[in-house]
Amino acid sequence: MDAFLHQVLAGLATGGIYASVALALVMIYQATHLVNFAQGELAMFCTYIAWSLINAGVPYWAAFFMTVGFAFVLGVLIERIIIRPVENAPVLSVVVVFIGLLVILNSVAGWIYTYTIKTFPSPFPEKPLFGFTYVSSHELGAIGVTLVVLLLLYSFFRFTPLGLAMRAAAQNPESSRLVGIRVGWMLALGWGLAAAVGSVAGMMVAPIVFLDPNMMSGILLYAFAAALVGGVDNPAGAVFGGFLVGVLENVIGSYVVGNDLKLSVALVLIIGVLVIRPSGFFGKVHVTRV
Amino acid sequence: MSKRALIALAVVLAIACVLPFVVSNYRTFQLTLALIYSIALLGLNMLTGYNGQISLGHGAFYAIGAYCAAILMDKYGVPYWATIPVAGAVCLLAGFLFGLPALRLEGLYLALATFALGVSLPQLLKYHHIEKWTGGVQGIVIAKPDPPFGLPLNQDQWLYFFVLAVVLVMFALGWNLLRGRIGRAMVAVRDNHISAEAMGVNNAMVKSLTFGVSAMYTGVAGALGAIAVQFVAPDSFNIFLSITFLVGVVVGGLASIPGAIFGGLFIQFVPNIADEISKAAPWAIFGIFLIGFMYLMPMGVAGAIRLGLARMARRAQNSRPGPGAT
Amino acid sequence: MKRISIPIAALLAAALAAPAALAQKKYDPGATDTEIKIGNIMPYSGPASAYGTIGRAVVAYIKKVNDEGGVNGRKINFISVDDGYSPPKTVEMARRLVEQDQVLVLWGPLGTPPNSAIQKYMNMKKVPQLHVYTGATKWNDPKEFPWTMGWQPSYQAESRIYAAHLLKTKPNAKVAILYQNDDYGKDYLKGFHDGLGDKAASMIVKEVSYETSDPTVDSQVAQLQASGADVFFNITTPKFAAQAIRKAYDLGWKPVQYLNSVSGSIGAVLTPAGLDKSAGIISTQYLKDPKDPAWQDDKGMNEWRAFMKKYYPEGDLNDVFNVSGYGAAQTLIQVLKQCGDNLTHENVMKQAANLKNLEINVLLPGIKINTSPTDFAPIESEQLAKFDGKEWVRFGEILGQ
């Protein structure tokens, strides 16, 4: 029983990682109706920027917020400069551009920072909370941060005019233009926010898995699964999905089939969930009227 | 097909037949690989371009085809040419079976399901209970086929012509399929599946069948690939292969048969060019190429050619004096 | 094959200068009077791109050798290409180097699957596949594959050293193993099983694998702890090794830990994991660790540091991979030197199989390279070492001579 509890808690901890990256994916989807495959690499790159700042002597929280700001600007720039030219191209062409971006970011990070792993500091205390060795203070803290970000995003989209404008721009660009929304800038803003959320995710993840250019590649698959299983247009769903995926992955790997077949079981599960609920657990079911 | 298209095809075919005798064996080998990829891309193109179902996991079918060929040749001594239809049949079934539950999934969700397939297959290939057949992490080494009937060709040239013949057969079949009723049904399902259903198209059947056929093409390519490279190992078939296929289809041109050839040439040769340009970050150069291609040719190479030809035709038309022209 | 006939004057001069050696030049494609072409295949892109730094270190070293005059008056044209760790690409690149670039030697291709894919081809073409960069045991097979030779100590041999040590010190231990689910991990695993012999089934209580696509191995380590084992064999690559070491400590699990030498680097693994958390770990070594205080003022390592500073400044001075590439390249240079003016494929293999007590400045003192026509394993010796929280303390004798 002890070991099982342990696996569940470890799963929640890794689930927190998936949830934070899934949030960034959902963010971008809500703003642009596209899934950005380069999200993970963008987050990793921004985490390296933070690392450089901290190494240069900047205190943690100053570096944290500077990085979030930098990530926001980077996201906006990428949208304006790289994505804009293919705005009207077929979806798959845009996907290829994302793939190109992913590959460039990964390669450049490896070139500048080499592939040796780096430690990334955590703002949370070293000692486990309440002497509870199963989950470290950082992992708990990271989950907390993810929930705070989720709350902020939810409030932003629900209760602010800007959030409403962004959602409108993504769902119906033509009508939005007609009511005076600057759709182009809404998209850029969406990217900026997603990049910022991604950078927070990166900085929370790096202390757990160590910082290296391939840090996010494994996580992206699970985050993708988490976002979709929870419902790609629902930030809370994404977070739920993240925890679910984390726990299931651990429990399946430990008790059901062993780590050798973990991925195949994950595949069957994902298909199973999606067959029963094709829009994910909490996603909006799209009804097309003829 | 129009007369002009037929002539173009004949010319291209003639060049293709002469090439192995004028270039080195190494280049012939590379061209063989490009042709093999183009078969795989045609398969993926049917699914994604013509039927609108995105797949991020076609590397898995390529792997299944490759392992079929390798296991048959290595463990059961089956001659290489006989493994091709078997690989195709196995993948047809596998694709159809995968397509069935995937029917209900749209766009992103289907992408996720296929992504999971692409990621999980290498691990499955390493599973120790089937290691006896798959060779596990060590993989399987197979022999290169010799030209039959003592033809005056070397192994590379023979393999090239063998692959070329398979390409012609598969492409002809594909062209026939896409032009006919089923092809139109596929496109109808892609463009407006509700109207298609209303008009009597059995969406479920069409979509699953397309998945099956698409997997069959990719499986055939996988088998040929195993024979050409003479080696299969789980690491050869990771998720990057699936992503590379998708890139190839988009760059070559969606919903286009010649697009598959352009795509095959792209994914075979452009990474090498990127490597020549920069050792420090070869992938970054490849990424820049990708983005550049999408800027210049968002509809792929085939799309750009189509546009170019249309523009030339329009210009020719405009320069001809019309009835009311001044 | 080009055979250059020697003008009489040169013959006379050579005869006067070195009466014992008739300076007859023999060249295969890839060698001329002024140049030796060497091919190399490394994963500069793709999932294994972390190892690309070895290629860059070697390219830098060759540049140094060329700056200092080359080998026997010839410059080395070192052509290093990327295969992305994908065997089909490796096959293509090997064919390009052998058939198009016409190299004399294909040196140091990295990875077991890539090398497995080209082994038959290289032996058919009778071009040396020299000093392949993997610890798999199968490269030491001069009868079946006379043109293929490894360099590193084999993984299985290393595992057997750990097994032997365990049987001697803790014969009733319960062992838990974490291994990477690929050829490297499984090779170490096999060696360990073989080393424990009949006792393997009773001693090994839990074996758990992971994929390189897994974000963390925390779950796996937790499983291992839950098995109640008191010995932990850690077969992981650097990033996962650091995670595993740290997690084990944080869980309060304090087993006797054997760490595979691939991840023995103080700078790249133990420091991120936590030096205090790594205290007590046992591993084997054959290279000098750049962060080990014992080699702070070592002549050989200082030469390496000077080399890195001048020729590969963007390389990481913490990374033992950069030391390894430097050491391996020196072995190549020695082989070429021994070839003299007889630069044929055959003679390269002959000289590669004729290294006697070769010492390299970045190998541990006492470890020498020896090869013979029946022994295609250049480095067979390693030494056990225990990490005391600051440095690796070597103990016991040099094994595997």
Image (cartoon, rainbow, N blue to C red):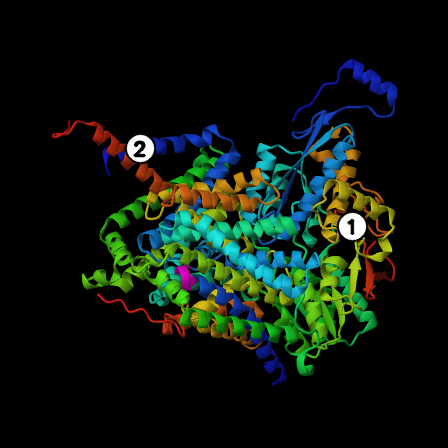
Identify the residue position indicated by label 2 in the image.
B8
Check disc 1 and report its element: helix, strand or loop. loop
Query: Residue at (41%, 50%) from the top-left corner?
Result: A84
Label 2's element? Answer: helix
Q: In the shown orientation, is residue B289 left or right of residue B217?
A: right
Residue A150, position as x, y percentages in the image: 49, 72
> Residues at marks 2 and 1, common chain?
no
- Residues under labels 2 and 1: Cα distance? 60 Å
Which label lies toward us, 2 or 1?
A: 2
Which portion, as a residue range, is magenta? A29-34
* Quarter of the rendering occupied by the N terminus of chain C: top right
The answer to which image quadrant residue C27 occupies is top right
Determine the chain carrying the residue at label 2.
B
Q: Is residue A231 magenta?
A: no
The reply, left or right, for residue A283 in relation to residue B315 is right
- According to the image, label 1 marks what residue? C379
Q: At label 2, which amino acid type do we have?
A: Ala
Picture disc at residue C44: none
The foreground one among B154 and A201 is A201
Residue C168: image location, x then y, percent: 83, 70
